[in-house]
Amino acid sequence: MTIPELSGVHPAWLPPEAFRAIGSRRTLVLGDDVLADTVRAEVAHACARYGGTLHDDRDGAYDLVLAQDPEAGVGPEGFVLSRRDGATTVVAGGPAGLLYGLFEVVRRGEAAFGADLPAEAHRPALRRRMLDHWDNIDVHPVMGQVERGYAGGSIFWRDGGPRDLTRVRAYGRLLAACGINAVAVNNVNVHATEARLLTDRLGEVAAIADELRPYGIRVHLSVNFASPVALGGLATADPLDDGVRAWWARTTERVYETIPDFGGYVVKADSEGQPGPFAYGRDHADGANMLADALAPFGGVVHWRAFVYDHRQDWRDRSTDRARAAYDHFAPLDGRFRDNAILQVKNGPIDFQVREPVSPVIAAMPDTRLAVELQVTQEYTGQQKHVCYLAPMWREVLGFRPWGPDGRTVADVATELVAVSNVGDDPYWTGHPLAQANLYAFGRLAWAPGLDPADLLDEWIGLTFPVAGDPGRLRRVLHEIMDGSWRTYERYTAPLGVGFMVRPGHHYGPDVDGYEYTPWGTYHFADRDGVGVDRTRATGTGFTGQYPKPWSDVYESPAECPDELLLFFHHVPYGRVLHDGTTVIQHIYDTHFAGAEQAAAMRDRWEKAAGDVPPELHARVRELLDEQVRSAREWRDQINTYFFRKSGAADAHGRRIY
Ligand code: GCV
C-alpha cells in the first residue's frame, strides 16, 4: 500500500506537515488487516519524511502505540486515546478504530505528545457517515457532469469512461481523516449510461471500491427503480412481481460476487421524473423492501429517499403544499420498512434552502431507520463562489429537539448522516478553497454531532494551513470571514425563511418571481400587502400540524414563531412587527444592506491574509470574493427593489433603493 501523493492537487487538510509530529517519533503499530496495513503505511510515509521509525515488536519503548483490542468497549470504529509515561497509546476496538485513532493523533499534532492524558474514549455517534456524489459518467447537457457540482468534473469518470483513479485513493484518505465511511458514487437521478453501473459497467464501481477500501470506506450505488425493464428486458418493475424480485436478487448477488464489501443501493423514486413504485399502484415501503430483501443476504442496505413531491403542481392551487409531501407520503408507512431499509430525509421539508425548519418526517417515524441528508455542495448557498461555512446550520439541525427542550435531538433520532458531496476534479477539490471546510466539518459532525462549528473550523485551519506566515493572524482572519458566513449569506439572500427566490434552473443569483408561477411548488406569495406562505392549521395548508408539540403550536402562532422562519409559516403584512421591534419590510431592507456590506468586509479581511497562505490560493479566494461582493449587491438591490415596489414602504434610513 502506497500513500497517494498528487502533484498539482491541493492536499486539503492532509498536507505532509500535518504528519510531522507522528513522523518524527518511534511508533509501534499492531494488527494484520487491510486497515492496519494502511496505518503502517501512513506512519512509514511520515517517518520517511521526518526521520521517525515504525516498529512491529511489542518489546521496546515507543512514543506512540497503535493497537487493537476488541475488548476495548468502544465498538469496531472507536478507540481509546491516552498518554502516560512518555507514551501515547491508541487502543482501537477494531481495524477502523485504528485508522480513526491515527487521524485523531494527526489532528492533535505535537499536543498528542505533550502532557499526560487520562484515557479518552472516542466512538462515532452515527454508524454510517456517508457522502452522496451526484456524479454522472456522461456530461449531462443541462446539469454538466456533476449535478449541482461546482468544482469541475467527476473524480470518478471522464469523457464517458472511467478515469485514472489515483486521486480517488487520496480522496478516501481525506474522507477517513474526517470520519466518513461510505460513499455513493453516482447521481440519484440515474440516467441510461449510469444505470449500467449495476450490470455491465459494475467493474467501474469495483475499481473505485478498491481505491477506497484501504481507508475504510464502503461503496454504494444509486440505482434506477426501472432497471428490471431498462436493463433486464422485463415487462414490469412492479416490486411485488416475482420475476422482478428474482431479477434484483440475481443482480445483487452478482454485485456482491464482484464487490464483497459493497454497501448497498441509493434510490430516488417517484421524484422529479425518476421511476418508482407508484406506477404499479404500490407504495414506497413495497419498493424499498423489495431492494432491502435483495440486499439482506449480503448485509447490504438500501437508502430510500423521502424527497417525493409533486413537481407538476398548479401555482394557482394554494392548498397543495410541497412542504407537506414527504410526511404525507412516508409517515403512514412507519413500521413497514425492513431493518436494512433506511429512509433518507432531507434536513428541511422543501429542498436545502438557506433557512428551513427541520423536516417533520424526522419526528414522525419512530419505527423506521432514518438517515438525515444534508447538502454540502452549495446549490442554494452560493455555489462555491460564495464563502458560506455551513457547519453552524448543520449544528442547529442536529441539535434541534423535535419534542421540545427535554426531548431527544435530531442527532439522537437519526441512525445515519448523509450529505451531497461538494467535490470535483478541481485542483482545490471543492472549487472554492474555503469550501473544503464544509466537507471536513460534515464528516466531523457526523462523528460527533455536538462539536462546536468554530472549534471545527479551528481544527480545519490548523491542519490545512500549518506553516502559514502568521498563524495567529490567519486564524483570526478566517474566523472573521467564515464563522458567520452562513448568516451573512442568509441576510443578503433569503429573509425570514423565504426560499427559492433564485434563478430557475441553475439556482444562482436572485430572481424573486423566477419560481412564482412555475409547477415546482416553491412560492413566496408576495403581493402589495404582504409576503410568506400560510402553513397554519387555522387558515393555511396545515403543515404546522405535522410537528409534535411544542413546535406544532409554536409554528402555528405568528407571535411565537421564530422570526427567522416567520415567512416560511405565515403570510404577514409588511408592517408586521418582529420580536426585535423592526417591521418585516424594514428587516428586509436592513438585512440586505447589512449582508452586502458584510460580504465587502470579508473581501477586505482576506487582504490581511495575503502572505499567510500560498499566493495562488490567495488569488483564487480573492477572485471569488470579488464575485461574492458583486452578487451580494445584486441580491440586495433586486430584493429591496422588488419589495419596495410591491409594498411602497420607504426605507426608514432613506438608503438607495431602485
Ligand atoms: C439530484 C434538487 C436539485 C436536483 C436534485 C434534487 C434531489 O431538486 O435541484 O438537482 O437532483 O434536489 O435531491 O434529488
Image (cartoon, rainbow, N blue to C red):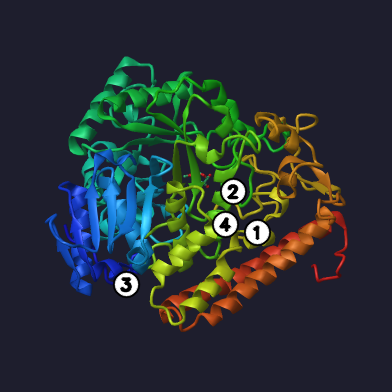
463 sits to left or right of 162: right
The label shown at residue 510 is: 1
- Separation of marks 1 and 3 at Cα, in angstroms: 42 Å
Mark 1 and mark 2 lie on one chain; the one further toward the N terminus is 2
Q: Which residue is mark 4?
A: 381
User: Which residue sits at x=61%, y=63%?
Assistant: 484
User: Which residue sits at x=84%, y=57%?
Assistant: 582
Q: Nearer the viewer, mark 4 or mark 3?
A: 3
Mark 4 and mark 3 lie on one chain; the one further toward the N terminus is 3
Question: Is disc 1 in contact with disc 2, using a CB cutoff of under 8 Å?
Answer: no
In the displayed orientation, state which residue is furthest to the front.
85
The label shown at residue 643 is: none
Identified by mark 4, the residue type is Thr
Query: Which element type, helix, strand or loop, lies under badge 2?
Result: helix
User: Which residue sits at x=62%, y=67%?
Assistant: 631
- Separation of marks 1 and 4 at Cα, in angstroms: 12 Å
- Separation of marks 3 and 2 at Cα, in angstroms: 33 Å
Q: Which residue is mark 3?
A: 17
Residue neighbourhood size for the residue with mark 3, other residues' Cα within 10 Å, grouped as few (<14), some (14–19), many (≥20): many
Q: Which residue is mark 2?
A: 396
Visible residue check, residue 414: yes
Residue neighbourhood size for the residue with mark 1, other residues' Cα within 10 Å, grouped as few (<14), some (14–19), many (≥20): many
